[in-house]
Image (spheres, rainbow, N blue to C red):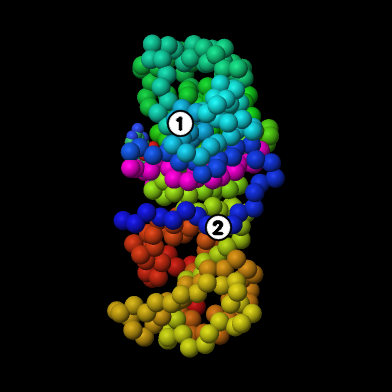
Amino acid sequence: MTAPRPDSTASEPPPEALVQTEGLTKRYGDFHALRDCSVEVAAGEVFGLLGPNGAGKTTLLRLLMGYLFPTSGRATIGGLDVTRNSVAVRRMVSYLPGDARLPRHMRARSVLEFFAQMQPDGDLTRSLDVANQLELELNRRVAFMSTGMRQKLALAVVLGARTPLLVLDEPTANLDPTVRSSILQMVAEAQSEGRTVIFSSHVLAEIEEVCSRVIFLRQGVLAKRQRMDELKQRHRIVAQLDAPLTSSLPDTLRSQVEISTFSPAAEPHTQWVRMDTAGDLAPLLGWLDSLQLKRMRVEPLGLRAIYDEVHDLERLSNPYAPPAEIGVTV
Ligand SMILES: Nc1ncnc2c1ncn2[C@@H]1O[C@H](COP(=O)(O)OP(=O)(O)OP(=O)(O)O)[C@@H](O)[C@H]1O
């Protein structure tokens, strides 16, 4: 497999970056866990990290926390170099590691009390409030908790603290759908309090729900940056025609529509057309209406399509496959 090239997409720097990395690289021998990663996270935004297992998400977060030393490049939080000022930096950050370890002999309440005292911005009342919202049993010992209960307890510790930055490595792993949705709500509340959140997840819908921007990591390389407000304006139209496409896209639409076609060998008389567009749908639908249209589906483009594009999965999930759930039949 060839190593992906770093993302070259121009991206506007956020107005005030709280977190910034420049050429951040972590190598183990010849292996790059993270390669030449430059990102900025603006104060007050919820910033998503996406990527398959082993893509480098945890490596990036641990480098930011100063738990790993970069092979090259640098990262700053609040203008402070995370390697040289790791103590000061950690005072600004509440970090939920992917494998949060808690003292097994302690009961939930004692764990919350302990961390509220230990953390500079710890706040027991807030931690108890989160625990209460997550319906955590405060008398239970960590050793006797399920994996999901331990995750809730770790979240109560982290979300209770009043730090300006929250770094959450897969915060909803092992949680049931109701609790997941409470956590997403708490992330949104943290943002409305003016806090900044960096959030890694494998669940695309979660990233879509709470993040304002997302980056895709692939084999340690920042493969793509995406603003969610831009993505929400993009649509995909998949249409099946009764005959091969003969008329071409009107000139006025060319600049805003990416079009591709496919003729299945099993159905030589039909043709599938796929169009991705960020513009007004009305003129495009008008043009489609002039064709020999058999059926058509219109959907928001969504992170799934971007994820498949970044990870080269489109060939596996054939976008032209005549889907049973096709939305509109004409
Ligand atoms: N100490 C280490 N020595 C060698 N390789 C390592 C070490 N730590 C991590 N790696 C490798 O670095 C790569 C990135 O790992 P990382 O944990 O950052 O991935 P991730 O995107 O968080 O994955 P996941 O979604 O599975 O948690 C992986 O291939 C991993 O095996």
Number of numbered discs: 2
Observer-nearest of 123 and 71: 71
Q: Is residue 284 above or below residue 245?
A: above
The residue lying at 57 percent from left, 68 percent from top is 277
Residue 128: x percent and y percent?
57, 19
Label 1 sits on a secondary structure element that is loop
Q: Amino acid at mark 2?
A: Thr
Mark 2 sits on what residue? 9
Where does ligand 1 appear, by image quarter?
top left
Residue 124 included in the magenta stretch of the image: no
The residue lying at 64 percent from left, 36 percent from top is 18
The residue lying at 64 percent from left, 49 percent from top is 13
Q: Residues within 10 Å of mark 2 (few under 14, many from 20)?
A: few
Between disc 2 and disc 1, whose residue precedes? 2
Residue 46 included in the magenta stretch of the image: yes
Residue 286: x percent and y percent?
60, 79
Q: Is residue 171 visible?
A: no
Q: Is residue 325 visible?
A: yes
The residue lying at 47 percent from left, 53 percent from top is 6
- Depth check, mark 2 against mark 1: the one in front is 1
Q: Would you say the beta carbon of the disc 2 residue lies within 8 angstroms of ligand 1?
A: no
Corner quadrant of residue 45? top right
**Farthest residue, direction bottom:** 246
The segment highlighted magenta reads 30-53
Mark 1 sits on what residue? 69
Residue 168: x percent and y percent?
51, 33
Label 2 sits on a secondary structure element that is loop
Q: Quadrant of the N terminus?
A: bottom left
Q: Amino acid at mark 1?
A: Phe
